[in-house]
Amino acid sequence: LARNWAMIPHVTQFDEADITALEAHRVKLNQQNEKLGIKVTILAFLIKAVVDTLKKYPEANSSLDGDNLVVKHYYHIGFAADTPNGLVVPVIRDADRKSVLEIAREAAELAKKAREGKLSPAEMQGGCFTISSLGGIGGTKFTPIINAPEVAILGVSRSEIRPMWNGKAFAPRLMLPLSLSYDHRVVDGAAGARFVTYLSQLLSEMAPAMKVAAPARKKPQTRLIKWQDERAKRVGLQNRPAALGSIPSPKVAAPARKKKPARKSAVRKPAKKPKKR
Ligand code: COA
């Protein structure tokens, strides 16, 4: 962490989400699923909302490999866990393909294993993005340190009921503090602000739209991008985004598949900027 703090130009963008409706939904969900023995905390919803935000802002779902920016099209989300032996980051793999209940159950199992010191190295590897939730402990805001080679991390603090102006009157709302630290070589300030604003909006609006079932499985991918702009050069990188085609995801990301002949679309004309999704 000390090396990441020293080597990565961090910026932290703060925001908060109105989770009044989401919290009511969470309480109801826990009542409905009491017999299953699964307790859903806000972490599971955060993971779902982060996945959707990463889909919209894929720059944050990337890692720097020398001069290359590898943009991932799979969603392995790590979460910091406080254990008697220190901080560890178990990873929920393919979080986009899992329901909130599945994520909650897996996170609880991984957190338990982490506290018992029983996590395997594979269970802590391959993360795309990390969430550090200190909400169960307390505090209002903090600056999380990026978990390299990832380029962004979300910090979450304790939610509290506060009077919010709704245009006519103050109303009590449950507000969740968010802090997004990002690598400024990869994510611009405006993009960082858009990311956290979108995430906050999703959390505020996701309760009625929640899907409990896991969506259909899709093939994970990564995309390799070269950097070639002045800003990148200033910070020691040589090339600005120009899509070079697709490379397969790391072995840990998906089961082995039969080799297929290269698709024509794999070789593309260099683009000035990565497409937003
Ligand atoms: N606001 C208010 N309450 C919150 C909250 C938030 N943002 N997040 C969690 N809580 C509540 C939970 O609902 C739960 O309440 P309950 O016992 O009344 O049901 C309680 O706090 C404990 O939750 P927790 O055990 O922390 O569950 P979690 O799923 O939220 O978090 C871990 C799981 C593993 C992330 C967490 O236990 C942990 O280890 N956090 C520390 C991370 C860390 O050290 N980060 C620093 C990195 S530098």
Image (spheres, rainbow, N blue to C red):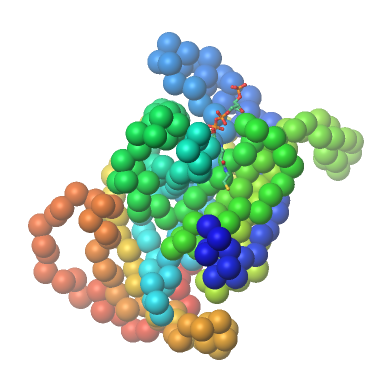
The image position of residue 53, as x and y in percent, is: 52, 53
Q: Residue furthest right?
A: 169
* Whether residue 251 can be seen here: yes
The image position of residue 78, as x and y in percent, is: 45, 46
Question: Total label count?
Answer: 0
Residue 266 placement: quadrant: bottom left
The image position of residue 44, as x and y in percent, is: 50, 35
Ligand 1 picture quarter = top right
Whether residue 55 sits left or right of residue 137 in the image: it is left
Up-down relation of residue 125 to residue 29 (above or below): below
* Whether residue 195 can be seen here: no
User: Along the line of sight, which residue is nearer the eye, 103 or 242?
Assistant: 103
Whether residue 131 sits left or right of residue 176 in the image: it is left
Residue 181 placement: quadrant: bottom right
Residue 202 placement: quadrant: top right
At 41% across and 42% down in the image, what residue appears? 90
The image position of residue 270, as x and y in percent, is: 37, 84
Whether residue 236 sits left or right of residue 63 in the image: it is right
Up-down relation of residue 56 to residue 139 (above or below): below
User: Along the line of sight, which residue is nearer the eye, 265 or 197?
Assistant: 197
User: Along the line of sight, which residue is nearer the eye, 98 or 263?
Assistant: 98
At 46% across and 44% down in the image, what residue appears? 88
At 43% across and 11% down in the image, what residue appears? 35
At 24% across and 64% down in the image, what residue appears? 248
Q: Residue furthest top?
A: 35
